[in-house]
Image (tube, rainbow, N blue to C red):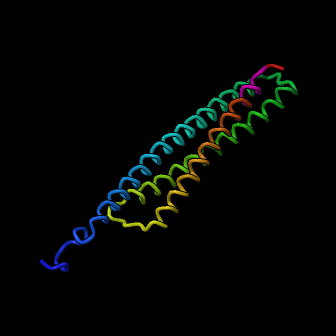
Amino acid sequence: MSLMSMPAVAQDPGRAGRQQQQMMQMQEQVQHLNRMMEHVAGIQERAQNMERHMMQAMQQMQQNAEMAAQNADRLRNQERLRSMAQSMGDGAREMHRAMEQLRNMIGEPGAGWDQEMQREMERLRQHWSDMTDEMEQGLQIMERLQDRIHQPG
């Protein structure tokens, strides 16, 4: 049997190992993206819940016919915070969609991405991981602000 008729893997035994390692790395990246997407979905859900809660609180405050100046200020701040929660939820939803696309790219069988492309996808995944952490911290701050707005005086 000549070398020409042998499969490329049989001609280069190290190639099969590299391909298997690349597949494992891509699977790990997909799994990490799945975890990040779940986290972002949780952030989105919490932001939406916060927005709903703020809307209910605003309606209750508006129903009070004798709204004092302090309540008017609280109502304005409540509306601002509600708007921020809505924006945070919208951003999380769009980030989740982008993560889905990257996950699909990484997990595409037979894509044969070269090492530079794989490094760039990993950089993007890491960047989104950092952004997810930042979104989480931002939402925690907003939750504390929400608690402060609801405190009397």
Q: Residue at x 66, y 38 (%)?
A: 137
Quadrant including the C terminus: top right
Q: Residue at x 35, y 61 (%)?
A: 18
In percent of width and height, residue 100 lies at 46, 52
Q: Which residues are magenta?
A: 146-151
- Decide whether residue 57 is among the magenta residues: no
Q: Residue furthest top?
A: 152
- Which sits in the foreground, 1 or 36? 1
Quarter location, residue 105: bottom left
Q: Residue furthest left?
A: 1
Q: Count of labels shown?
A: 0
Q: Residue at x 86, y 24 (%)?
A: 68
In percent of width and height, residue 39 lies at 52, 40
In percent of width and height, residue 117 lies at 48, 66
Quarter location, residue 52: top right
Q: Residue at x 64, y 35 (%)?
A: 51
Q: What secondary structure do most residues of the magenta stretch adopt?
A: helix
- Which sits in the foreground, 119 or 67? 119
Quarter location, residue 6: bottom left
Q: Is residue 56 above or below residue 38?
A: above
Quadrant including the N terminus: bottom left
- Decide whether residue 147 is among the magenta residues: yes
